[in-house]
Image: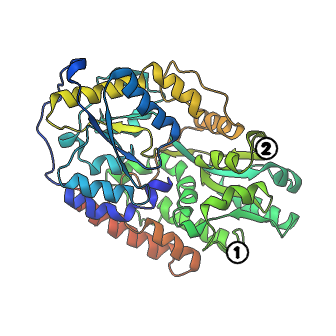
Amino acid sequence: MKILVRTLAGLAAATMLLAGCGSTVDDDVSDVSDATKPTLTLWVNSADTNELKDMYDRFTEETGYELDIVSFPSDGYETALLQRWSTGDRPDILEWHGNFNWVAAINPVENVHALSDEPFVERTLGGLLDNFASLDGVVYGVVLNTPSSFGLYYNTEILEAAGVTPPSTADEVLAACQAIKAYDPSIVPLQEAGGSQWTPLVMHGSHMADSLQDGFLDRLIERDARVDDSDSPWRTSLEFYVELRDAGCFNGDITTAQFENSAQVLLDGEAAMVSMHTGFIQQAIDASDLETVNSLVGWTPWAAERPVVTSETSPIGTYYLPKTGDADREAGGRAFIDFMTGPAYNDYIAASKQIPTLDGVETPDLPEPWIQVQAAVSEFGSVPPIWAPLPGITDLVLYTGRIITGEDTPDSAVKLLQQQAEQGAEQAGLPAWTP
C-alpha cells in the first residue's frame, strides 16, 4: 500500500509513454543447456525482504543462472521503472504490482508473456489471480506474497476497559470513538498518520469495501457509475471521514504524524485504534516482540454497513516475464518462475512467516492479528480497492490532506477525482464515461 500510493502521481504521465512499446515475439520459449545459461536481468524494488534476496541467491546456486539485479528505489518506484520501461528496455524478470491499474500500465498483451498455462496457476489459492496479476482473464504474473489487507488495529486493553467491542461498521467506528473519549479523554481514539500522506486512503478503502463487493467496482469499470455520483461510496467515505474529524476522533498532530510511529503509539496506549494495512503487524513486532503483539494488538475488518476486507498486492514478491526476443533468456525466466513456485517456496513461507498463496504449502505459526485477518477474509470475502481500475488519478494523496485541513469538501474532491479518472482513462485507452 505504501509503495503503491506514494507514487500514483507519476502514473498518468507514464501511461502516455507506454503506447507502442511492445514486442511481437511469440510466447514459446526453448530450453537451454547448463553450459550456455545466460545471466538474467531482474528488476526489483529496493524494499525486497531478506527472505526474497535469499531466494535469489538460492536460485543461482541451484539452477546455475546468474542474476543481474537492478534495484529501483521504493520511493518513486513506479515512476522510475515506468520511465525506463517506456524507452523499450526490458529485464528478463520484472518485480511489479499485481493491481489492475499497474498491470494495465505495462501493456502486458504486447510486452509480457502470458503465464496462464504455468503449473502455479492451478495451485494459486482463493481466486487470487482473478483480482491480481491478470488482465481480461489472462494471467501474466505470479503472486508469492500474501496480499495486504486493510482494517483497524486496536489496543485490546483500552477497548476492554472502555467497554468497546471491536467495530465492524462505520456507525460502530464512530460509537467506539465516542466511548473511548468518554472513558479517557487523553487517549486518541483513532491515530492517523497524515504526515505520511498515503495513510488516510486505508480508511477510505475499508469504508467502501461493502459497496465494492456489491458491484460498484464493476459498475465503475463498465462506466455505469461515476466517482462523483450522489451515492458514490467514494463520496460517502469522505463524508464519514469529515464526520470523524469533526467529532475529534483523530490525533491532534494528524497532519504531521508519520506511519513509522503508529505501532509504538498503539502499543504505548496513547491511541486506541490505528487504520492500517497488514504491514503494520510486522512493524508492531519490530517495535516490541511477538508475545506483546499477540496479547495487546487486535485487528478487525470494517466497512460502511458490514465487514468486508479490502486487499491489494504490493510489487514485493510479484513477478512477470517480459518479452525480450532472446529465447535462452526467456527460458531462464521460466526457470525462475518454476523455482520460486517449486519446493523452495515452502522454505520461503516458513522463513517469511506469512500465509502462502499456493496450495500444498504449510502455513507457519502466525501472529494473532494475521490469524484474525485470515479468518475475516474467509468469512467475509475480500475486494480490490476502488482506485485499482482508475489509472490516471493523480490527487489520491492530495485530496485526503485537503479534506483533513478543510481546504476541500467531499463534493469538490470527488468532482476532481472524476475529472482525473476521465483524463486517465483516455490516456490509457480505456472506455470513457458518458455525461
Label 2 SS: helix
- As drawn, 247 above or below 95: below
Secondary structure beneath label 1: loop
Residue at the spot of label 1: 252
Callout 1 environment at 10 Å: few (<14), some (14 to 19), or many (20+)? few
Image x and y of residue 92, in percent: 26, 37
Give the residue drawn at x 53%, y 44%.
148
Residue located beneath label 2 in the image? 292
Q: Residue 164 bears which disc, if any?
A: none
- Going by the numbered disc 1, the residue's amino acid type is Gly
In the rendering, at what x and y percent does residue 309 appear?
A: 57, 44
Picture residue at 61% right of the left edge, 71% below the top: 242
Which residue reaches farthest bottom? 407
- Image quarter in which the C terminus is found: bottom left
Q: Report x, y in % for residue 383.
A: 49, 43
Percent coordinates x, y for residue 111 in the rendering: 20, 42
Residue 424 placement, left or right of 371: left
Distance from Cα at disc 1 to Cα at disc 2: 27 Å
Q: Residue furthest front?
A: 35
Instruction: Say which of 421 and 226 sits in front.
Output: 421
Picture layout, residue 60 above or below residue 72: above
Q: Looking at the image, which residue is at 31% across and 50% down? A: 222
Amino acid found under the numbered disc labelled 2: Thr
Drawn side of residue 162 relative to residue 91, left or right: right
When asked about the image quadrant of residue 417, the answer is bottom left
